[in-house]
Image (tube, rainbow, N blue to C red):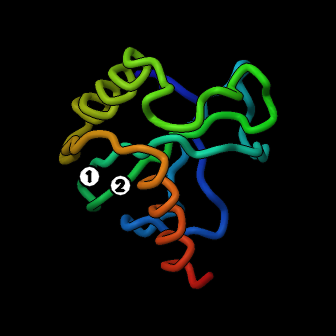
Amino acid sequence: TQYPLDYGFFPGTLGEDGDPLDALVWLSQPTFPGCHVWVRPVAVFWMADEKGPDAKVLCVSSHDPRFANYVDIDDLPEHLLDEVGNFFEVYKLLEPNKDTTVKGWEGRAAAEAEIKAALARHGH
């Protein structure tokens, strides 16, 4: 199973699962492990796995003019949201003792609030 978008995390944060807050990044070109990308959060996908709540913040490149008009969830293609949601529903199906519970999408305000909460959990 292949991730539908580039996948990373927000440095200096702590998600509710004890790991840094996850970031899904929609880019015009793929990146590579270890690189840093300037992003703009536009939505958050609420889900949980065997370790507990595991939010995914969907972001776009903040320096790519192709993404200038993507500022909130209503600007995103519905098919993209469906594809990401479907991925997280099924990506652990073949792993023993692992599962996911999908709760759905919220927009930019909720994404920014989750980033702030994750910064606070980390002590910032």
Determine which of the numbered discs, if any, sits on residue 48 in the image: 1
Do residues under tags 1 and 2 come within 8 Å of each other at their CB atoms? yes
Who's the residue at 38% across and 19% down the image?
78
Return the mark for residue 84.
Answer: none
Mark 1: give few (<14), some (14-19) or many (20+) Cα within 10 Å: many
Kind of element beneath mark 1: strand
In this view of the protein, which residue sits in the foreground, 55 or 75? 75
**SS at circle 2:** loop
Determine the residue positioned at 62% across, 81% down.
124
Kind of residue indicated by mark 2? Asp
Q: Residues within 10 Å of mark 2 (few under 14, many from 20)?
A: many
Residue 87 versus residue 53 in the image, above or below? above
User: Residue 42 at what x, y percent from top left?
Assistant: 53, 41
Q: Quadrant of the N terminus?
A: top left
Q: Is residue 87 above or below residue 54?
A: above
Q: CA distance from mark 1 to mark 2?
A: 5 Å
